[in-house]
Image (tube, rainbow, N blue to C red):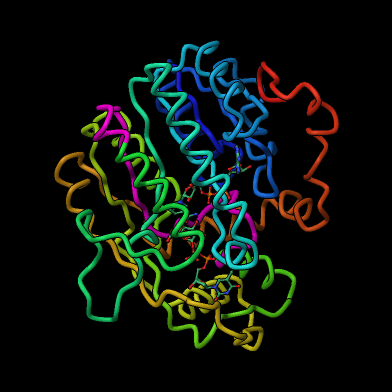
Amino acid sequence: MNLLVTGGCGFIGSNFVRWQRQHHPEDRIVVLDALTYAGNLHNLDDLQADPGLYFVYGDVCNGPLVESVLRDHAIDAVVHFAAESHVDRSIWGPSVFVQTNIVGTANLLEASRTAKVERFLHISTDEVYGDLGPDDPPFSEETPLRPRSPYAASKAAADHLVLAYVHTYGFPALISRCSNNYGPYQFPEKLIPLMIISALQDQPLPVYGDGSHVRDWIYVLDHCAGLDLILRRGRPGQVYNLGGMCERRNIDIVHAILEILGKPASLIRFVADRPGHDRRYAMDIRRARTELGFEPCCPLEEGLRQTVRWFIDNQAWWQQIQTGEYRGWYQRNYGARLAVEGAVA
Ligand code: NAD
Ligand code: DAU
């Protein structure tokens, strides 16, 4: 299979590419990524010499580019991660979320339909369902969409477009909706990497509001395994919820990180809450379990330990992000050519 992975230089995308290369080395992967602030080619450094991996620098909103990638690489399946992904940034500036997450998805769908792509996996999120009270049942795939942040609204709009393509054109798309991921290569604006790095540097740990908001946490490689099941065995037109079956309050996550690192709780600072902050997310994953055999395997305590270890062992990775050094070198050297073929630079 020839796979196009959009957003393959981001957190989940790069973990997915690595997972695929290990488990399906016979497939060929083309990564299409615009290398925004969240995209980092260093996330694929260990795959530089892999002849089955190609990188194309470009924007999913660029119609002619997407069409040529699909055609020139004879793409059989698309796995669409590329997105603006951070809720706080969507509150500060929503338009890029509308552009990438909605217009970009519309563009990719149309090009993929025209190119007769056989499978299109759209990576969505539990946030499209809105939020839950403490005693509400978890979100199922039938829960109506009720997004509450500009990020979630842009993802929900993209989901509607995907399902409209299924309904109108019989387009073979599938949607995954997953809960909060954590693990190696996560950009340090998100809760877990931000807390690890701040604690390592004895900097304050900003906890929004009272810290009692609840998220369902899944180790990123469990998510990747679930996505692979959906990609290869899922029913076209179907939505699959994925999650870690692991609800925790933010403050408990922060304490757990401090404990692993042996750092004091006095580093915690309660700060102003996120506007419109969703209280709780939880996922009903029975469909993925019964139809596909999906099971999140990594317990949170183990996953957190591994993640903390990774950030300790890979200080150069996040220091380059802190200094800004990771940005721009690729664009400066190759960007003028727009699409660059070949093994990862
Ligand atoms: P990320 O922000 O780490 O990575 C996004 C990637 O997309 C980056 O490599 C970036 O350069 C690329 N990109 C952004 N705009 C682009 C454009 N216009 N054209 C091409 N590439 C572009 O995101 P992530 O956390 O890895 O999330 C990946 C996907 O998974 C997103 O669609 C997100 O909504 C979804 N998701 C994330 C989580 C989570 O907990 N992080 C959970 C569920 C679903
Ligand atoms: O639920 C899936 C979603 O999880 C994905 O779709 C998003 O792409 C991803 O960013 C994530 O969204 P969240 O808003 O839940 O993740 P974030 O890491 O930003 O925040 C997790 C929780 O921690 C949330 O309740 C806000 C809180 N938080 C976050 C930051 C960055 C803090 O208390 N302090 C912080 O500094």
Q: Which residues are magenta?
A: 165-191
Looking at the picture, how far across and down is residue 163, in whole percent? 30, 40
Looking at the picture, how far across and down is residue 4, in whole percent? 49, 25
Residue at 61% over, 28% down: 47
Residue at 23% over, 40% down: 238
Residue at 35% over, 39% down: 162
Image side of residue 154 versus residue 10, left or right: left
Looking at the picture, how far across and down is residue 81, in whole percent? 49, 41
Say which of 160 and 323 sits in front.
160
Q: Is residue 326 visible?
A: yes
Quadrant of the drawing holding the N terminus: top left
Residue 332 is covered by the magenta coloring:
no
Say which of 124 and 68 sits in front.
68
Image side of residue 86 versus residue 139, left or right: right
Most extreme residue toward the left is 290
Image side of residue 339 versus residue 71, left or right: right
Residue at 70% over, 20% down: 340
Q: Is residue 1 visible?
A: no
